[in-house]
Structures are given as C-alpha cells and as structure tokens.
Image (cartoon, coloured by chain):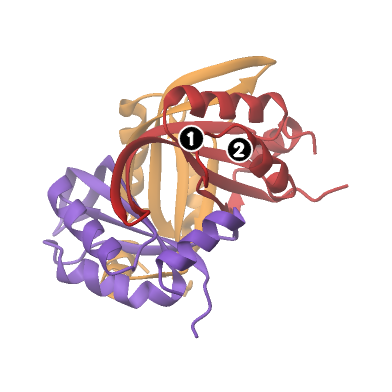
Chain colours: A orange, B purple, C red
C-alpha cells in the first residue's frame, strides 16, 4: 500500500474554464483532495520574447504517490506545450484534515 | 530555548472577517510574524457533493516551534468542522527579515 | 558547474510598478525562469503598530544556486527597509518544464 505523504502541486492554465476542467478531473478521479484557483499575472521569456499573461494558478492538495497520475492528467488536458508543474512538500498538518484527504484520495 | 525554524502555515476561512479575526489573534499573541490574505476559489468533494466556494486563504509566516499553538488558535476560532491547515518548509531567507521575524515571535 | 535545484522565492512589493521592475530585472538577468504577481493583503506589527497593507506578492521560479543573486537584486531595487524574502523547496516537477527553466537560467 502506498504511503500517504501530503504534497502541494502547482500549475497554471490560460483561463478559468481550462483550469476548472483539469481540477474537476483530478477531483473526480480522486487524485486531489482539494483544488484551489486564483488569478495571477505571469511574466517570462518565450522564444526570445517577454510575455506577460493573465493566468489561473491551480493549487492541488494531493499525495506524493499520486504525483505521476496528477501530472499525466494535467499534461493531457492542457493547451500549453510545456505547462509549469511543480510539487512542493508539506511538513505537517491538522491531523483530521490529513485523515480526510487520505480517505478522499483512496489511500 | 526552542530553535527558530521559519515555516509557512496555510489555512482558509469562509470570509474576510473570520480570516482577519484569526490572523489578528495570531499577531497579537506573537504566533505569527506576518499574515497575508488572498481571495481564492476552492473546489472539493464533501459528503459526496462537489463544492465550489469563494474563500480567503491565510498565509501565516511563523516558526516551526509555534505550529501547535497556531493550529489551536485556528481550530478554536474557525467555523469549519475540519479546516485545512498545512505547514510548508522554508529553506532560506533574507537574514534581516528572519531576524525581525524571530524577534516578533518572541524567540 | 552549479547543480540545478528548482526553488520558489517569494517576496512582496508595495505596488505593481515596483514588483514588475524587480521581476523584469530578474528575467533579463536570467535569474528567474518565470515570475508571477498577485495582489494580497498583508498584516503585521511594525514599530508597535498593526499595519494592514495591500501589496503585490512576487513568486519567483529560480534555481537554488541563484538565490544570493536573486536576493541582491530584490534588496537593491526595493523601497522597503526589510523586505520579506523566503525560499521554498520544490521536490519534483514536469521534466520538460524543468529542462526549459534550466536553459532559461543559463545552467
């Protein structure tokens, strides 16, 4: 049985519709305990050009053992060539919430 | 004397009033160096139903040794049955800011 | 050759103009792969007074080996006496995105 280690996976989508489609799939497939959306502005250099886009950041509360499946869901449902997907550790949390997450994630 | 390890604790509240009451208590009791608030949209499954709520995320800059007291303050002043409370590590920071945080936290 | 370890550096600026000046310098000098901006509200105690300011959070995707140069750029271009600068670890990420980041960062 895989061990439950809570993590936060962060990605961005070009609009709310795409963000909620990805988030909804993750929740439906029990790959996320909770998904949060927030509007941000991103700045980066792409093909030598400075880009400045409004985007939706998706903050995904999940388990480390689900990372590959989360990544696959994002990549397959994303309109970007190379989406930003980063996983950040969680050191500790409120035990009843973690228990709820574990159950939601089918672990 | 407890060692000072900076951490970020993240929670959410249903509205700004509740968020600022929790944040204010943490600052007053020197359990947070700084508290930040931002509006997000949360999506999750609760009792078999897909929920989609606007919430306030509270980002709390504190010390690892204060985690239990921070958690207690959140739980006691929260209207949710099971608030999301997660602690994330900080690897490094601007030394004068960390020194200021340590002093603010009474460490 | 320095090893590429992706990290997230977080700071805040008093307004969008200052935030974008700092972010633009980091991108121009290849000290950030991507910079994100979001409006937040900050609460803290400064000189014994409770402050409550609207600020811009700057989320900087960079490499651990660039931390000192990122910090220097922020401090030199910041209007605060003591800006909040914190580095948070990234445990994992989408390999094509990390490869793109590494190339952007000149590593």
Residue that badge 2 annotates: C74
How busy is the neighbourhood of tag 2: few (under 14 within 10 Å), some, or many (20 plus)?
A: many
Q: Which residue does the image show at 41% across and 26% down from the upper left?
A: A55
Disc 2 is placed on an element classified as: helix
Q: Is residue A28 visible?
A: no
Location of residue C35 in the rendering, given as x and y in whole percent from the top left corner: 55, 32
The reply, left or right, for residue C76 in relation to residue A22 is right
Residue A93, image quadrant = bottom left
User: Which residue is farthest right?
Assistant: C1
Q: Is residue A106 above or below residue C37?
A: below
What whole-number distance in Å separates the C-alpha atoms at marks 1 and 2?
Answer: 37 Å
Q: Quadrant of the C terminus of chain A?
A: bottom left
Q: Is residue B5 visible?
A: yes
The reply, left or right, for residue C2 in relation to residue C92 is right
The reply, left or right, for residue C100 in relation to residue A73 is right
Q: Which residue does the image show at 40% across and 36% down from the upper left?
A: A57
Location of residue C19 in the rendering, given as x and y in whole percent from the top left corner: 50, 29
User: Which residue is farthest top?
Assistant: A49
CB contact under 8 Å: marks 1 and 2: no
Residue A8, image quadrant = bottom left
Do the residues at pointers 1 and 2 share their chain? no
Tell which of B107 and A29 is nearer to you. B107
Residue C56, image quadrant = top left
Residue that badge 1 annotates: A76
The chain containing the residue under callout 1 comes to: A
């Amino acid at each position: 049985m895989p061990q439950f280690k809570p993590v936060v996976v962060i990605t961005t989508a070009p609009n709310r519709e795409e963000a909620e489609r990805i988030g909804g799939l993750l929740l439906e497939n029990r790959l996320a305990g909770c998904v949060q959306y927030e509007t941000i502005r991103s700045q980066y250099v792409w093909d030598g050009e400075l880009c400045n886009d409004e985007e939706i950041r998706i903050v995904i509360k999940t388990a480390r053992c689900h990372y590959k499946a989360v990544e696959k869901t994002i990549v397959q449902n994303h309109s970007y060539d190379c989406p930003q997907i980063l996983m950040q550790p969680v050191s500790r949390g409120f035990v009843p919430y973690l228990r709820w997450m574990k159950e939601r994630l089918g672990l």
